[in-house]
Image: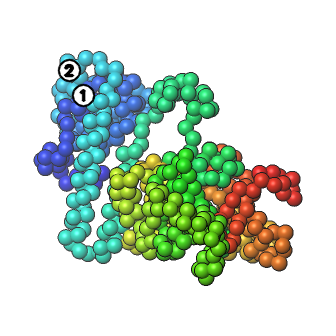
């Protein structure tokens, strides 16, 4: 929280406060000091509007950390040690906190009131600071917007932190209750990507997940992402709203790719116009499926997190939202200045992870790789260390997968034609491994592969 110009600025300025709720929370801890821990899991000293309440809560924390009882006498003694007893209106004020209070076993409602008022004050302080920066005009608009973006995302992250829950509370809140929790068929599954082995290994794409899909140029990053988007938006059992942010290709080019992929039509033949009647029929059918689907495309170059956040919130309110795809990470910009590109990418990936959690939808974010796979002798398969420009990409991601096609490095070997691998190299909640796919280069489409490979593995 921003520093206070006056100990009780919140009261003077008429900011959102609830003194009774604050007193009740502190008084309840004095009556039953075991309540300190659940309260401290949600509140911090800065959440109290009065300076004396903040000091009282801080001294309660000192007593708790030393394993001592929290009551009137010990709290007064602790305040005296810090020369703060007079500043909280003495022992007489401490006595009024728990005077006449019943034993309240559950004070969650009052804790939430204190937290809500604190959040409102923080929003006001943040907004005022932004207004001051705008009035002074000592920084560029982009730098001020960057500060706004970071501050608001940080507020949202703090707001999203829930108290710890016991196993019984987790199961009670699970849809269907205890029996459904233990029944695998009843467990909530993620969104299917259309790639069978990937869905088996991951359970699909889950709400709040940040999925980094990375590869060297010309491996098919955009193609695979669009294949997933098309499956989610058009498959009869799904038809979920999908937002595609393309920072490199135009919306027309993306739509052309998707129509040709859905129809399995050679893109070169489409551009040249050499199509037979069956191919034209398939193209019309593929185009109609996309037109009727809840797919939205944005091709604004150099977009940033604040823009994406605003557009996604609007889309969610108007159409719903099931999946977000961003092509690609290194083309995103961050408002304001960063010391280096690594820090800028770190801020972007952290922001995207916060957005995925806030909006409760999976994000598929494409990323470039360094040149390391090319210079690696023998095996050119990518590794996590090849993620370009920032280790925070791996840190923030829930899933990391690489696309690898050996035919790109050995174009003369006919046996490699069309063979592709999706290397699932990181998964927070499941296994990693290789997924064999087929890549139809002419129509930029990946498909499941079902035959046995040379190494004996089978899809």
Residue 43 appears in the figure:
yes
Residue 324 lies left or right of residue 389; in this view the side is: left
Q: Residue furthest bottom?
A: 272
What residue is drawn where x is 62% and y is 57%? 400
Instruction: Locate residue 63, reporting x and y percent.
Output: 38, 31
Q: Who's the residue at 67% across and 62% down the image? A: 446
Crowd around label 2: few <14 · some 14–19 · many ≥20 (10 Å) = few
Query: Where is residue 244 shown, x and y percent of the image?
Result: 48, 63
Foreground pick, 261 / 344 = 261
Q: Which residue is mark 2?
A: 99
Q: Quadrant of residue 80?
A: top left
Q: For residue 188, what is the image quadrant?
A: top right
How many marks on residues? 2
- In front of the other: 86 or 163: 163
Q: Would you place residue 236 above or below residue 127 in this image?
A: above
Give neighbour class at mark 1: few <14, some 14-19, many 20+ (Cα, 10 Å).
some
Q: Which mark lies nearer to you, 2 or 1?
A: 1
Q: Secondary structure at mark 2?
A: loop
Which label was assigned to residue 341?
Answer: none
Dot 1: what SS? helix
The residue furthest front is 277
Rendering coords of residue 52 (x, y %): 22, 39
Q: Earlier in the sequence, mark 2 or mark 1?
A: 1
Residues under numbered marks 2 and 1 in contact, where contact means CB atoms less than 8 Å apart: no
Label 1 sits on residue? 24
x, y percentage for residue 109?
30, 30
| Residue in the foreground of this view, choosing between 450 and 6 | 450
Compared with 323, 254 (above or below) is: below
């Amino acid at each position: 929280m921003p520093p206070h110009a006056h100990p009780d600025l919140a009261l003077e300025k008429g900011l959102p406060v609830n003194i009774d709720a604050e007193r009740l929370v502190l008084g309840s801890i004095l009556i039953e000091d075991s309540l300190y821990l659940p309260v401290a899991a949600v509140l911090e000293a800065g959440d109290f509007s009065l300076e004396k309440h903040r000091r009282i809560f801080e001294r309660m924390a000192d007593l708790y950390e030393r394993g001592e009882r929290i009551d009137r006498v010990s709290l007064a003694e602790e305040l005296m040690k810090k020369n703060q007893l007079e500043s909280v209106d003495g022992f007489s004020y401490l006595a009024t906190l728990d005077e006449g209070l019943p034993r309240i076993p559950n004070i969650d409602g009052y804790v939430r009131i204190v937290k809500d008022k604190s959040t409102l004050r923080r929003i006001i302080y943040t907004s005022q600071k932004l207004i001051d920066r705008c009035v002074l005009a000592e920084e560029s608009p982009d730098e001020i917007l960057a500060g706004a973006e970071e501050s608001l995302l940080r507020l949202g992250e703090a707001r999203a932190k829930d108290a710890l829950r016991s196993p019984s509370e987790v199961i009670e809140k699970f849809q269907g209750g205890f029996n459904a929790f233990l029944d695998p068929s009843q467990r909530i599954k993620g969104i299917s990507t259309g790639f069978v082995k990937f869905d088996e290994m991951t359970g699909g794409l889950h709400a709040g997940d940040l999925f980094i899909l990375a590869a060297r140029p010309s491996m098919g990053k955009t193609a695979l992402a669009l294949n997933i988007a098309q499956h989610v938006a058009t498959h009869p059992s799904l038809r979920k709203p999908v937002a595609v942010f393309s920072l490199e290709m135009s919306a027309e080019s993306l739509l052309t790719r998707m129509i040709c992929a859905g129809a399995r039509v050679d893109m070169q033949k489409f551009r040249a116009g050499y199509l037979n009647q069956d191919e034209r029929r398939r193209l019309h059918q593929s185009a109609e499926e996309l037109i009727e689907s809840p797919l939205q495309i944005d091709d604004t170059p150099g977009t940033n997190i604040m823009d994406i956040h605003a557009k996604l919130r609007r889309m969610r309110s108007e159409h719903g939202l099931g999946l977000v795809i961003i092509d690609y990470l290194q083309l995103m910009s961050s408002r304001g200045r960063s010391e280096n590109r690594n820090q800028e990418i770190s801020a972007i990936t952290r922001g995207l992870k916060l957005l995925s959690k806030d909006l409760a939808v999976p994000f598929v974010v494409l990323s470039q790789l360094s040149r390391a796979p090319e210079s690696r002798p023998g095996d050119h398969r990518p590794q996590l260390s090849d993620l370009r420009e920032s280790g925070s990409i791996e840190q923030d991601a829930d899933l990391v997968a690489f696309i690898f096609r050996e035919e790109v490095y050995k174009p003369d070997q006919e046996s490699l034609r069309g063979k592709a691998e999706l290397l699932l190299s990181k998964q927070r909640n499941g296994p990693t491994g290789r997924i064999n796919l087929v890549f139809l280069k002419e129509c930029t489409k990946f498909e499941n592969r079902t035959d046995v490979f040379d190494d004996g593995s089978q899809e």
